[in-house]
Amino acid sequence: MDITRRVKYEGELDHSFPDWIASVPGGEKIRECIQCGTCSSICPLSIYMDITPRRLIAMADAGFKEEVLGSFSIWLCSSCYSCTVNCPRDIKITDVMYAFKRRAIEERIFPSKKFAIPILARAFADMVRKNGRATESHLVFLLALRVGLGRLFSLTPLGLKLLRTGRIRFRTEKVKDRQQIRTILQALEAAA
Ligand code: SF4
Ligand code: SF4
């Protein structure tokens, strides 16, 4: 069932959600949205989205937290900034999209149970923390294990081509001074 089409009662809405958006950098002016639709019409990916950017902003402002954070749209956004530079109300929609993604990861609200993007992001971060670099072949394998091996088999012909041309390796890739990477990451975490 399309969750955005289910009737929702006032008591089910999260009225702290718009306040939270207004507190994140870029979302300060969300309440000034005039629903002009410029963001949706200019977004190159809105035709693939389950909720268009204009509708996302309206739903977020109304407190539809679960629907907004559980939408595919926030993960489809390619951060092209077209919506942001054209919004007549100076709402930084791209930054708001990033804030939605961060909150979705924090609250573990995803469009599906085996949603690949946060799994990939976590595996990538762990690998960089450990080795200073990500090894693509290991990432693909880890992802396939978590979301289903069927996908791995369908990617085999492409993987073989990449192997033959040296674009992908099985050997773990590492930087020389891994401690330096860890120190940088620790400093970033402490500053966040
Ligand atoms: S372009 Fe700006 S004002 Fe217009 S609908 Fe989108 S967010 Fe709202
Ligand atoms: S930044 Fe994201 S939402 Fe905005 S126009 Fe680009 S792809 Fe669409």
Image (cartoon, rainbow, N blue to C red):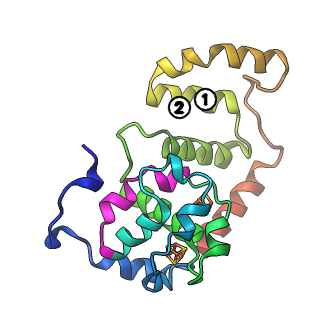
| Whether residue 43 is situated above or below residue 170 in the rendered picture | below
Going by the image, does 137 lie left or right of 142? Answer: right
Q: Which residue is mark 1?
A: 140
Depth order, front residue of 60/89: 89
Q: Residue at x 65, y 74 (%)?
A: 86
Depth order, front residue of 115/33: 33
Image quarter where ligand 2 lies = bottom right
Q: Is residue 96 magenta?
A: no
| Whether residue 72 is situated above or below residue 55 in the rendered picture | above
Span of residues in magenta: 62-76
User: How many tags in the picture?
Assistant: 2
Q: CA distance from mark 1 to mark 2?
A: 5 Å
Picture quadrant where residue 16 is located: bottom left
Quadrant location of the N terminus in the rendered image: top left
Quadrant location of the C terminus in the rendered image: bottom right
Q: Residue at x 52, y 22 (%)?
A: 151
Q: Residue at x 57, y 55 (%)?
A: 77
Q: Which residue is mark 2?
A: 143
Q: Callout 2: helix, strand or loop?
A: helix
Depth order, front residue of 154/120: 154
Picture quadrant where residue 168 is located: top right
Depth order, front residue of 110/62: 62
| Whether residue 12 is situated above or below residue 3 in the rendered picture | below
Q: Are marks 1 and 2 in contact (CB under 8 Å)?
A: yes
| CA neighbours of label 2 inside 10 A, class few (<14), some (14 to 19), many (20+) | many
